[in-house]
Structure formats: C-alpha cells, structure tokens
Image (spheres, rainbow, N blue to C red):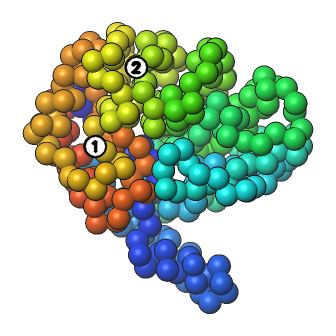
Amino acid sequence: MATAHLVGIFPRSEELVAATRAYERGRYDEAALDRLFAEEARRVVALQVDAGLDYVTDGLLRWQDLLRPLSEGVDGMHPGPVTRWFDNNTFYRRPVIGGWLPPMGEVVLRYVDRDALAGHRWKAILPAPWTFAMLAEDHYYADEEALLLDVADMIRSAAVALVEAGCAYVQFSDPVLVARPREGAVDRAGRALARVVEGLGVRTAVHTCFGDVAPVLPALLEWPVDEVGFDLFAATMDRLEGRAGSKTVLVGALDGRNSLLEDPVRTAETVQRVADRLGAERVGVVPSCDLEFLPWPVAAEKVRRLGEVKRRLAPVPVA
C-alpha cells in the first residue's frame, strides 16, 4: 500500500553552508566547493537508500530556492528581490520577467547531481506552472494567461530533459494553490499542468503545502497526474473529501517545519486513516514540505522515520 520519498529541498550541512558563504566572499575555491556539493549529494542519497525510500533525490542541494534554477538559467528573466517564502523564516529571489520565456531544456541538468543518483530510481522536483507564474514579477506579458502558458512550456522542457537523463518520477510543487487560494485558480492551474505532463512517460505528481488542501482536493484528484500530495499539518483532516480512485495519495505526515520527531506507530495510524477516508489503495508517506527548514541531523532522523512509517504500512511494487 505504501511508498515513501522526499518532496523538497534537503538542508545543507553546516560545512557546506560555511563553504558556500566563503565562496561568495571569494575565500573558497570553486572546484573544492563543487566537490563538496557532490559529496553531500552522495551522503543524502545514501541516507534515503538506507531508510528504504522508494525514489531518491540529490537533496536539491544546488537549488537555493525552488524557483532559482529557472530564473537564473532561462533567458528573459533574472532573480529579483529577496522575498519571504510564504510564512516561513526563509527567502527566495522573486523571478523578474522582462522578455519572452524560451524553453529551459537541459539547462536544468546543471543543478542536478546525476553522479550521486546513478544506479538509483530517482525523482526530480520542479515548481508547478501556477506557483511559478504567480510568484514571478511580470514586466513583459501583461497577460496572465499568456504568461502561464509560456511558463508551462518552459517547465515542460525542463521535465523532458530530466526524463531523458534518467529521472523516473517528476513532482510539481504547487504551494500557491493552497496558501493563496483564488477563485478559478484550480481550473487554470490544472490546465497548465496538464500541458506539462502530457506524454512525459514517467510517474508524475502534484504536491501542495503551506495551506489547507481540503477545499481543492476533490479537483486535484481529477488532474492528469499519478499522485496527489498535501501537507497534513496545514490541512483540516475532518474536511478531507474526494475519491482517490487510481491515484496514489501522498500524505505529508512528517512535519517539515517542526523539529519534534514523530512517533512512527502513531504516524502510520494517521496515514492509514487518511487513506481510508479517501478510499486510497495506494498511499505515499512523505514530509509535509521541504526539510530545509530543519537542522541537518533532525532532517536526517525524519528521513529514517519516514522509512519506519512506510514499513508499518503494506508495501506496493514501485513503477
């Protein structure tokens, strides 16, 4: 019944944080920093493998925020002002769009540590078109629908490059959808994501966090993705409605914004209740959001407990 994997950015170790800061001040060698990133990625992959997770990520350690590789790597925009990341004590660079957005393609691979992922079933994480478009500062399109469609094409090109590089699963993160609800957003966001995932040929998911998924969950379960995930700590559990059907429901049952460690037995029971409520035959156990908000040792322990929760639920074959 259960699989388990991560849904966002993993924290950098204190050594990597210090090295990155030193590099930015011109006091650390670029090649040495690159080697350190590679070592840290292998360490994060090994942690997930040891915990028994079904798909692994490289921790997205080179991603300073969910949007940065796109705003840095695509012509027509640049990273703009530092902006608070929802209600967290972290920040992102708001993408500033000043021209047409071309496909991103293989540029995304600069931010993926493929050597660390080689030989493993690995997963990529990208922003959903709705979240990227709504968090960007547009000075070119002046037409929200035109912007959304070009953002979708840009993200699709990145997803295609990742699949061609061996990725087995692509998750699209859509926190804006639930954290900043807006009339008509679900339909428009769903159409944009459908444009991205059509014919990708790998398992796909949408994951929401930082807001209550209950009002939009029935609609999300109709989207053309294989898996639908949500932040259980931001949701009103008694209001969760909808039928999972053939979808895998990703239950964000380990709190990515709280250092307290969950009891695997109680967490597994909660996941089972959610699965039963939604009629889900397949469920994925995931953190509620990125683990980057936690100290490295705490995040590592959450990964181990993620594996423990999964083992307390019946396993399923992984595609």
Find residue 59 and report its horizontal and vertical position in percent: 44, 57
Task: Give the SS element for disc 2.
Answer: loop
> Do we see residue 102 in this rendering?
no
The residue type indicated by label 1 comes to Leu
Q: Quadrant of residue 141?
A: top right
Q: Which residue is mark 1?
A: 254
47 left or right of 189 in image: left
Looking at the image, which residue is at 12% across and 37% down? 266
In three-dimensional space, the C-alpha distance between marks 1 and 2, rounded to whole angstroms, equals 18 Å
257 left or right of 279 in image: right
The residue type indicated by label 2 comes to Ala
Q: Residues within 10 Å of mark 2 (few under 14, many from 20)?
A: many
Find residue 280 and report its horizontal and vertical position in percent: 28, 17
Select label 1 or label 2 by which is in front: 2
Looking at the image, which residue is at 36% across and 10% down? 242
133 left or right of 168 in image: right
Looking at the image, which residue is at 35% across and 48% down? 256
Looking at the image, which residue is at 27% across and 18% down? 238
Find residue 61 and report its horizontal and vertical position in percent: 50, 62
Task: Give the SS element for disc 1.
Answer: strand
159 left or right of 308 in image: right
Residue 272: mark in rendering: none
Is 189 or 233 nearer to us in this picture? 233
> Do we see residue 217 in this rendering?
yes
Q: Which residue is mark 2?
A: 214
Is 153 or 306 nearer to us in this picture? 306
Above or below: residue 59 compared with residue 263? below
Q: Quadrant of residue 296?
A: bottom left
Earlier along the polypeptide chain: callout 1 or callout 2?
2
Find residue 226 and report its horizontal and vertical position in percent: 44, 23
- Residue farthest along the bottom direction in this orientation: 27
Above or below: residue 300 compared with residue 144? below
